Amino acid sequence: MLALSLLLLLQAAPVPQPRDVRPELTAPAPETRDVLLRRQVARVALAQVRKQDDAWHPDQRDCAGLIRFAFRTAYKNVAPERLSTPLWRNDRGQPADFADAETLLQQSFTPLGRDEAARDSVRTGDILAFRQEHDSGPVFHLMLVVRPEDRAHAPARVVYHPGEKGAAVRTGLLQNLTTEAPLEWRPVPNNAGFLGFFRFKEWMP
């Protein structure tokens, strides 16, 4: 679970309205499949902040579930043929419809790094990951990046589900997370709980 102070920090950030999101989705760019997929991931993720889609099963509403739902919906809208086989890999590396946060990181995403250069390179659809140690064992948490293709338009945001049953999806500025969150939730190298930034393997060059 996220610290209450982190929830309050990111909840306080204004939620983009459709007119704010549209430039992210329509900024001039080569109309490649990956560009269109990133735009759709942004659209789906931010829509969950305003109202969670009934198609997103309540039993899968957690941080990893948001990633799975946003990606699957994006592929359904842009490249449905890809869904003839599952998007994800299980802990044995085999195609699977379901993967928890840890397995997503290990099997379906590749690390970009943990430093400022990696943070500057992230694009919409990339994720940042944390691991917190609890008495019951490690807990992984994922946040999705939404960043305008034209960076002068608006700063990068994170979108995430805090994990609690019935909780709302939240969004806030990546820079605020970096500078104002409790240390254990800051995406910075001196936070041992920060695992780094990650990108979907199929989107790697």
Image: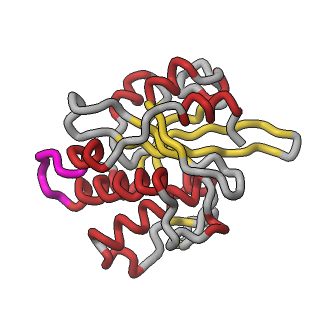
Q: Is residue 166 left or right of residue 26?
A: right
Dominant secondary structure of the residues highlighted in magenta in the image: loop
Q: Within the image, what quadrant is residue 39 found in?
A: bottom left
Residue 115 appears in the figure:
yes
Q: Nearer the viewer, residue 181 or 114?
A: 181
x and y percent of residue 93 in the render? 56, 65
Residue 200 visible in the picture: no
In magenta, the rendered stretch is: 25-32
Examine the image and state in which quarter residue 91 appears.
bottom right
Note whether 117 is above or below 142 in the view shown.
Answer: above
Residue occupying image coordinates x 58% and y 49%: 161
* Residue 24 vertical placement versus 33 (above, below): above
30 displayed left or right of 141: left
Of residues 39 and 35, the one drawn nearer to the viewer in this rendering: 39
Residue 100: name its quadrant.
bottom right
Q: Position of residue 110 (x, y in %)?
A: 46, 47
**Residue at 52 percent of width and 34 percent of height:** 196
Residue lying furthest bottom: 84
Residue 20 image point, x, y percent: 28, 42
- Horizontal and vertical percent for residue 6? 62, 30
